[in-house]
Image (cartoon, rainbow, N blue to C red):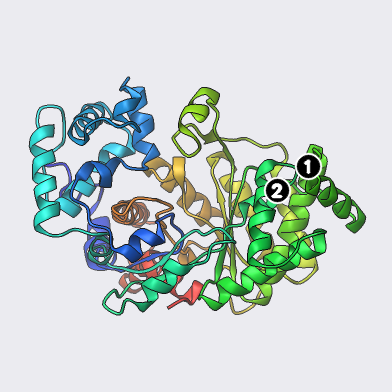
Amino acid sequence: MQLITEDFMLTNDVAKHLYHTYAKHKPIYDYHCHLDPKMISDNVYFDNITSLWLGGDHYKWRAMRAQGIEEKYITGDADPKEKFKKWAITLENSVGNPLYHWSHIELKMYFGIDETLGSNNAEAIYERANHYLKENNITTQTLIESSNVKLICTTDDPTDTLEYHDAIKAQKDFQTTVLPAFRPDDAFKVGTKQFVAFLKKLEKQTHSITNVETFVNALKKRIDFFHNKGGRLADHGLEVIHFESFKPTEIDAIFDKALHGTAVTSHEYFQFQTFILNELSKAYSEKAWTMQIHFGAIRNNNHNAFVKLGPDTGFDSIRDQDNLAFHLNATLDMMERENHLPKTILYNLNPVYNDIVGSTIANFQTEAGIQSKMQHGAGWWFNDTKRGMLKQMSSLADQGLIMHFVGMLTDSRSFISYSRHDYFRRILCSFIGELVELGEIPNDETLLKRMIENICYDNAYRYFKLI
């Protein structure tokens, strides 16, 4: 039985027209992902669907655990075919989960396989997929190019040498632009072992760090380094956005405590987070960068699993937060008051906060000449689902100008997750198409063409100005 038809998820005639005429063939502008630049540079060859499909994919790992699959078939050293068969068993039980859609879109898009995968045909599909990979010499770069990706921004530690980005740039036969993005998460973790380890790595790349001033200057040196390599975006993964006022003397004392391995209070932690975010925003604004903030995850919740498997293995959840509206508005207002609020994209993991984010960014759309300088980022992680995407788009349409939305991003470590752009585009076209059929948006071809093409690609192209 074929699930992924030409009109999959297109719920009305207008949606079908918009998708097939305007959305389907637009290029992809992937301004935030977690692809490994070394794998892109080395043009890694895939000869097995298991490593391509299950490697590093904590979405699938969570589902397999819910199915009762032993860990050796998930993150362990079991035979690749046996791992695939266990995933097939899981998939046939995941109806209603977006993984069911994503996996079958990937099978069709990248392997030409129309059948629905289950335990009855797992071995046959495994062999067909592996044969396809070998016969077509599928690599990281061929997957990117076949997906029509024009630009990729990876996610890179401030201390990274960016040598693989240099190597990619030197490969003239690879046409996709790959740029670094600055991700200084450890710079915020004052009072932790990660913070001290980060300081040592940062010193090796810059200069001696003895106080908070030298620390900030070191970060700015690395921003300069990224800028010279073509980087124009920063991203921050914060558990919460929490504004706390501070005095310079307080920040000096907090940094000194952290430097000497002394614990800091939660109040001091958030004072330092507020300070660092403000200092970094000054540098971003000066260089006309875009600041991204992903917030709302509570990580590594299963202690035993964390000890056994480490971080990023599928044990994270959505976090709630008290008084978010105050903290978010105060943080942005701090930057606005000092005239260094950069272009900003906010991604909330908790969908309950969609309207808070939407109404907050509307308070800071104050720079003439930039259409929606402040952006409400696409649904991500637990929200890059049909329901999550529709909630985010509905809120954005209510609170702002969806016409200027910079659209979808992969936020993924998988080289075949570009299928999710197609998933997003189908949902977008159905969302707009239904509003047209309800008479809430005029059936104006010029208007609809501009809206769909803007959200799929053109807005991101104009907003980031990277290619």
Q: Which residue is mark 2?
A: 196
In the drawing, what numbered circle is on residue 276? none
- For the point 66% across and 74% down, the residue is 367
Whole-number angstrom distance, CA of label 1 to CA of label 2: 8 Å
> Residue 370, how many percent across, how many down?
58, 75
Q: Is residue 278 left or right of residue 290?
A: right
Viewport quadrant of the C terminus: bottom left
Query: Is there any visible trace of residue 103 in the rendered image?
Result: yes
- For the point 87% across and 55% down, the residue is 252
192 to 427, vertically: above or below: above
> Residue 373, how many percent across, how many down?
59, 68
Q: Which residue is mark 1?
A: 261
Q: Residues within 10 Å of mark 2 (few under 14, many from 20)?
A: some
Q: Is residue 37 left or right of residue 418?
A: right
The reply to whether dot 1 and dot 2 touch (C-beta < 8 Å) is yes
124 to 433, vertically: above or below: above
Q: Quadrant of residue 75?
A: top left
In depth, the one of 406 and 200 nearer the eye is 200
Q: Is residue 35 left or right of residue 231?
A: left
Q: Residues within 10 Å of mark 1 (few under 14, many from 20)?
A: some
> Residue 74, how many percent across, how many down?
32, 31
Mark 2 residue type: Val
- For the point 13% across and 46% down, the residue is 129
Q: Quadrant of residue 199?
A: bottom right
User: Can you name the residue that lies furthest to the top here?
Assistant: 68
In depth, the one of 15 and 3 nearer the eye is 3
Q: Secondary structure at mark 1?
A: loop
